[in-house]
Image (cartoon, rainbow, N blue to C red):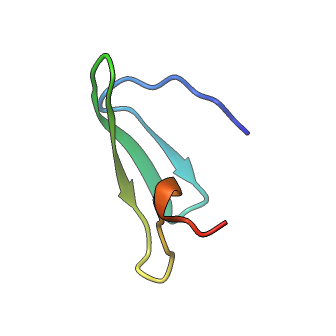
Amino acid sequence: MLVLGRKPGEYIRIGDDIKVQVILSDSNQLRLGIEAPKEIAIIRGEMEKN
């Protein structure tokens, strides 16, 4: 696992097609914006089947 610190407005790219941007960072909450092709499923961890 890669662990990074990012500030609001900063982002990372995964390959050429995926962008993950920090939208808001409060003391107990983080909001991310994710841009990815429609054919890539984005599933929240609590919704993932084990």
Q: Residue at x 43, y 67 (%)?
A: 36
Q: How many marks?
A: 0
Q: Is residue 4 above or below residue 1?
A: above
Residue in front for this viewpoint, 3 or 12: 3
Residue 23 screen position, x and y as percent: 27, 37
Q: Residue at x 61, y 59 (%)?
A: 15
Residue 19 screen position, x and y as percent: 44, 53
Residue that protrudes farthest toward the front in the picture: 50
Q: Is residue 9 above or below residue 13?
A: above
Residue 47 screen position, x and y as percent: 47, 64
Which quadrant of the figure contains the C terminus? Answer: bottom right
Residue that protrudes farthest toward the bottom in the picture: 39
Which image quadrant for residue 32?
Answer: top left
Residue that protrudes farthest toward the right in the picture: 1
Residue in front for this viewpoint, 30 or 23: 30
Which quadrant of the figure contains the N terminus? Answer: top right
Does 15 sit left or right of 47 as displayed?
A: right
Q: Is residue 8 above or below residue 37?
A: above
Residue in front for this viewpoint, 10 or 2: 2
Q: Residue at x 55, y 62 (%)?
A: 16
Does 9 sit left or right of 49 as displayed?
A: left
Residue 43 screen position, x and y as percent: 48, 65
Q: Residue at x 58, y 27 (%)?
A: 4
